[in-house]
Image (cartoon, grey):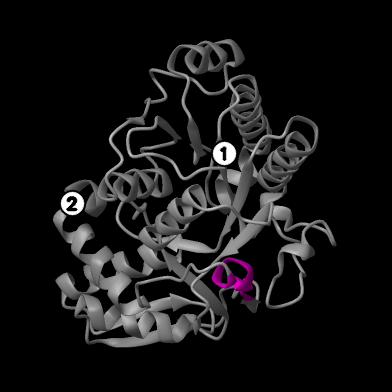
Amino acid sequence: MTKPGLSDSIFVAGHRGLVGSAIVRALQAAGYTNLITKRSSELDLREQSAVRDFFAAERPRYVVCAAAMVGGIVANRDFPGTFIHDNLAIQTNVIEACRQQAVAKLIYLGSTCIYPKFAPQPIQEDHLLTGPLEETNEAYAIAKIAGLKMCEAYAKQYGLSSITLMATNLYGPGDNFDLEKSHVIPALMRKAHEAKLAGARTMTVWGTGTPLREFLHVDDMAAAARYCLENDTPYSMVNVGSGEEVTIADLTRLICEVVGFQGDLIFDSEKPDGTPRKFADSSRLRGLGWKPALSLRQGLEDTYRWFTQTSNARLGN
């Protein structure tokens, strides 16, 4: 595969999401001038005929599939049928259309949450399908696994060039700050922000604070997607992580420093901690030459700046 030209057409599916919007920014900053994007109201990726007709009309040369039905624990628990149906439909339609139009390369977005619940640490790509999945997101995980296996099967049978990027916990501009639906960083950041504004003396955090987690700024994820778009790789899938772990307690303290909340932290040990450790081995991708650019503090500062400047973020919309 040759490196994409700056005028080559690139379809970014899911361009309004956290990852998709970052990928669009990264490609625009690199000088790509022919990016194709469609809102879900304009193109329903769950509809096979609509996707087929769109690809036939636009004939994108490269495709980044960042579109997916995603949500937190509650949404995964309450709507497993929707999660498995919509994700299977989206990725099946996009991957098949890529085959039909003979696209030069497909970047497919996965997630480290689709690895086995009790995968060895750090998690390597070969650990996929070696054990039972986390029950709370099983429907989503099965769908995404089917997608990456479809990419591998199409590579073998049809020669479709593709790579699956297995992202660790992502955060950054465009994140969801709704306290009931958000992930750990935006949830803690909003709590600290509101505690600061209220002049609170304390802030309560769920759990003991001891679990270890890995976080990656979404702009670094986008840079990884661009790297894999522009370079040949010998792998069908690679982990994409920061390579650094932090306890929830230390993460909370760092967020409080960034936000400017100076009260005391109370860790509620009666609340669940979740998995003790979740750490991805990203040595494959690093061995090819990619590495993240932003430290955790830099990434948190960037995210908080976006949060305070965006009214929708403050409202959790």
Type of the residue with mark 1: Leu
* In the depicted structure, whether residue 213 falls above or below residue 42: below
Relative placement, left or right, of 104 versus 297 is: right
Residue at numbered disc 2: 310
Residue at numbered disc 1: 106
Residue 297 drawn at (x, y percent) = 31, 79
The numbered mark, 2 or 1, whose residue comes first in the sequence reads 1
Task: Using the rendered view, name the quadrant where residue 143 is placed.
Answer: top right
In the structure shown, which secondary structural element does the residue marked by tag 1 occupy? strand
* In the depicted structure, whether residue 2 falls above or below residue 36: below
Q: Residue at x 38, y 17 (%)?
A: 42
| Magenta residue span | 278-287
Quarter of the image where the N terminus is located: top right
Q: Residue at x 57, y 49 (%)?
A: 74
Camera-nearest label, 2 or 1: 1
Relative placement, left or right, of 243 versus 41 is: right
